Amino acid sequence: MPYAIRALDEFPRCSLSQAPTALHKMPNLTAHFGGAGLYIKRDDCTGLALGGNKARQLEFYIGQAKAERADTVIITGAVQSNYTRMAAAAARMSGMECHIQLEARVANDSAIYHRSGNLLLSRILGATLHTYPHGEDEAGADQALEEIAESLRKSGRRPYVIHLGQNHPPLGALGYVVAAQELCQQMEAGLGFDEIIVASGSGATHAGLLFGLRALGNKTPVRGICVRREAKAQTPRIAARCQQIADLLKMENPVQSGDILLNDEAFAPGYGQMSEAVIEAITLAARTEGILLDPVYTGKTMAGFIARARQATTAQNLLFIHTGGQPALFGYEDDLGPLLSDSPFDN
Ligand SMILES: Cc1ncc(COP(=O)(O)O)c(C=O)c1O
């Protein structure tokens, strides 16, 4: 492959995603705004138990887990986490068990939120579920994972922990360094972008993509849309993630501070909370392109993308990275339903 970062070859990796994912124009959305060419890369179609960006990240974690001969994967996330659902599927594909810790990260007391969507899928996948009473305590959540791991070890299991906190090497971000190689290959056909727009949550996707592009000499601006915390807190996090990726790969960090672009206008009212901008984004993408977005990540990211599309000129091209997450739509039915047209079955 002409776009190759050789240092990636040093890491154990387990094939979990169907890639390259499609990259195509959204002609109806482009016509709707009448400005920039609007494109999408379909990382929602990576194909691991309904797909999403985390398939690429899990390739490195599951690769490492297998290298360590683990028999159980342990991971933490929000109640409607896509990451944990895909980790459960990846573990199953590799003959492992999965323990999922569900954090009380979103103030949502709906029964459907606690039963449907990703949670239902994780149960179908046979994951063992635990709860954690906080949602903003990464170190505490990781510590609780270690306690689960310890009790599994005592019963003779070989657990592998996928940590959440920033003080652990972001192995998963390497999946998006790989995606940057793929994207450079796709852009070689003559298609260039004035900006790439992507969700910025834990930062593994944003930092990995940005790092990979710069390491390959590609200078396309990458704008993260804040979905987890405001830009003030996310900016140093992305910078730190990029340095950690450089350390993992034993490379110079090619990312300059000016490369880290973040918008947080779509973040309010907070992680996993619906807003009018998110509803507009979800319904517009569905009704122009037949593309389904999720309420937590890609709905907000599309809201940020729409804001950029409104500012862009006809000479420009913008790329939206669709990172998946659609199963959460079902968990958010109570929030979404009342904002849509009436169902003939409502009473
Ligand atoms: C659908 C979806 N998109 C985007 C993200 C954010 O990715 P990252 O955590 O790598 O920033 C997540 C994280 O869970 C996700 O599930």
Image (cartoon, rainbow, N blue to C red):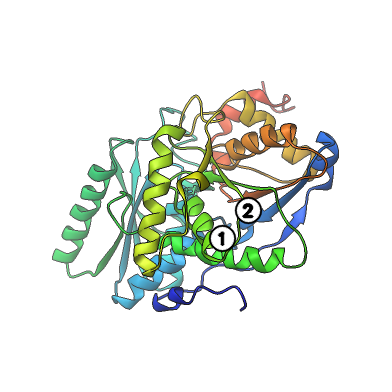
Q: Amino acid at mark 2?
A: Thr
Q: Amino acid at mark 1?
A: Leu
Q: CA distance from mark 1 to mark 2?
A: 8 Å
* Residue drawn at 26 percent across, 65 percent down: 159
Q: Would you name the residue on which mark 2 appears?
A: 220
Tell me whether the residue at label 1 lies in contact with that at label 2, contact meaning CB atoms closer than 8 angstroms.
yes
Q: How many marks?
A: 2
Badge 1 is on which residue? 213
Q: Residue furthest top?
A: 347
Labels 1 and 2: the sequence-earlier one: 1
- When the figure is inspected, residue 292 is found, relative to residue 207, above or below; the finding is above
Q: Quadrant of the C terminus?
A: top right
Q: Residue 174 versus residue 65: which sits nearer the camera?
A: 174
Which residue does the image show at 35% across and 35% down from the upper left?
104
Q: Is residue 97 visible?
A: no
Is label 2 in a helix, a strand or a loop?
loop
